Amino acid sequence: MTSRELTRAAISATLHCLTGCALGEILGMVLTTALGWGNAANIVVSIALAFVFGYTLAMRPVLGAGVPFRRALGIALASDTVSITSMELMDNLGLVTIPGAMDAGLGDWLFWASLVGTLAIAFVITVPVNRWLIARGKGHALVHQYHHAHSAN
């Protein structure tokens, strides 16, 4: 794989990770804010949901290629754990350091601007992480072989 192809693969993997993380973060924040839960619960629920959505999105093409559930789950865990962890660490670190971000309501521009901003920063930081993993045959490289397998059948 050329350097350019490796970078493209890392960007693609990170966009995939960003999708799962953003879905989990948004749903977690909406739920905990609507329920009136505190910041600690907000962070825990959002991170948990980010992992659930991230792993679910990673498993989808693997399951579509006919891989049994337990094996698909193992592949998803191996392929996306480092990426999701990196993204969630950066995102949540950013959210807790932006004054007022964790206390902003769903209708507050600071809530959405902080979330978008921290996810964008997390994306930029996670691309090199995924590039490093893919170059070593790890991370998203484990799932990539399944992405188009079901369309070939």
Image (tube, rainbow, N blue to C red):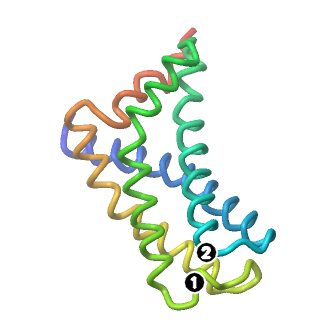
The residue under the point 50% across, 76% down is: 95
From the image, tell me which residue sits under label 1: 101
Q: Secondary structure at mark 1?
A: loop
Type of amino acid at the residue the image marks with label 2: Asn
Q: Amino acid at mark 1?
A: Ala
Spatial CA distance of label 2 from label 1 is 10 Å
Image coords of residue 138 (percent x, y): 28, 33
- Residue drawn where x is 19% and y is 38% of the image: 2
Looking at the image, residue 133 lies above or below residue 78: below
Query: Which residue is more in the foreground, 18 or 76?
Result: 76
Residue 66 picture quarter: top right
Q: Which residue is mark 2?
A: 39
Q: Earlier in the sequence, mark 2 or mark 1?
A: 2
Q: Residue at 44%, 83% (x, y): give it.
A: 97
In which quadrant of the rendered view does residue 27 lie? bottom right
Q: Position of residue 33 (x, y in %)?
A: 74, 72
Q: 89 or 40, which lies in front?
A: 40
Whether 130 is drawn above or below 99: the answer is above
Q: Which numbered tag is attached to residue 143?
A: none
Secondary structure at badge 2 equals helix
Image coordinates of residue 147 in percent, x first then y, are 49, 27
Q: Give the number of the mark in front: 2 or 1.
A: 2
Residue lying farthest bottom? Answer: 99
Q: Taking 41 as reference, is 140 left or right?
A: left
Location of the C terminus by quadrant is top right
Residue furthest to the right in view is: 34
Q: Residues within 10 Å of mark 1 (few under 14, many from 20)?
A: some
11 vs 16, left or right, is left
**Closer to the camera, 44 or 136?**
44
User: Number of labelled discs?
Assistant: 2
Q: Residues within 10 Å of mark 2 (few under 14, many from 20)?
A: some
Left or right of residue 77: residue 3: left
